[in-house]
Image (cartoon, rainbow, N blue to C red):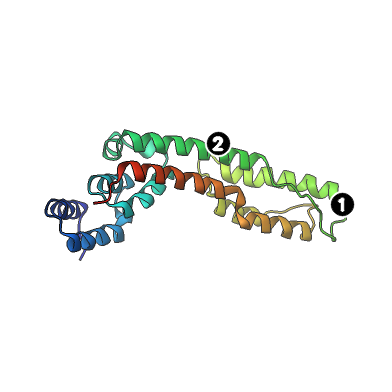
Amino acid sequence: GSYTLDELTKFLQFCDMYQCCHAREFVVSHVFAARFRFHPAQLINLAIKYHVRSLFPFAFQSLAETPITKITQAHRELMGNEVFLNVVYVQAALDHHRQIVAAEEPRILMHSNDCDDPVGCSEDWHATWWNGMGHFLLDGRNPQPYGDAVKCFKDMSFGRVSEGCKDLMFKILDDGAAFRHAEHFITEACQFLLEKLVYEP
C-alpha cells in the first residue's frame, strides 16, 4: 500500500531502534519508491538520521536543481546547515558554468567539405549559439537544462552554417562534454557529504 512520510519515518525509527534489518530494507524500498512524493530535504533528513545511503544521492541531486528561493527555513532545518551550504555552493558553481557554456560556443575547428563559406559559417554559428543556447540556458524565468536547450537549439535556423558543419557540431553537443563535468561536480559534492554525514548502520 501507500504510506505517508510520517508512517515511513516511524517505521524507520522502529527498525533503527530494534535493528530489524529485513524490515528496514522493506521500509527503505518503500521510501525510495515514493521518493518523488517528498521534498528532497525530507529525504536528506531521513538519509542522515537513519543511515539510508541510497536516498542521499537522489535527494542531493534534486536539491541541486531546486531554486534556492524554493528552499524554506523548515527545509534548511531538515537538511542541516552543511548540506544546505553545499547545495548553495554547487548551485553557484553550476550557474557560473552554465554562463560560460552559454557565452562560449564550441568552435568549428574544421569545416566540412560542403562548406562554401567558412567565415560566414563560423559567424552564423556564433550568432545562432548566442541567440539560442545563450537564451535557453540563461533565461531568467525558465532556464532550460542542457539537454532540453540542445533540443530547442537544433530546431533553430542556422543561416550560412553548412549542413555538414552543423552535423559535426551537433555530434559534439550530443556528446554533452560541456556538461559532463557539471554532473561530475554534483556527484563529487554528494559523495563528500555522503561519506561525512551518512554512516553505514
Image quadrant for the N terminus? bottom left
- Residue 106 picture location, percent across and down: 70, 47
How would you rate the neighbour count of disc 2 (Cα within 10 Å): few for under 14, some for 14-19, many for 20 or more? few
- Residue 35 picture location, percent across and down: 31, 55
Label at residue 117: 1
Does 20 sit left or right of 68 as displayed? left
What residue do we see at 31% from left, 52% from top? Answer: 53
Q: Secondary structure at mark 2?
A: helix
Picture layout, residue 93 above or below residue 65: above
Does 150 sit left or right of 108 as displayed? left
The number of numbered badges drawn on the structure is: 2
How would you rate the neighbour count of disc 1 (Cα within 10 Å): few for under 14, some for 14-19, many for 20 or more? few
What residue do we see at 21% from left, 52% from top? Answer: 5
What residue do we see at 59% from left, 38% from top? Answer: 99
What's the amino acid at mark 1?
A: Asp
**Residue situated in front as seen by the camera: 119 or 194:** 194
State the CA–CA distance, disc 1 to disc 2: 34 Å
Q: Earlier in the sequence, mark 1 or mark 2?
A: 2
What residue do we see at 32% from left, 33% from top? Answer: 81
Label at residue 25: none
What's the amino acid at mark 2?
A: His
Mark 1 and mark 2 residues within 8 Å of each other at the beta carbon: no
- Residue 101 picture location, percent across and down: 62, 42
- Residue 140 picture location, percent across and down: 53, 38
Does 107 sit left or right of 185 as displayed? right
Q: Which residue is mark 2?
A: 96
Mark 1 or 2, closer to the camera: 2
* Residue 103: quadrant of the picture: top right
Q: Secondary structure at mark 1?
A: loop
Outermost right residue: 116
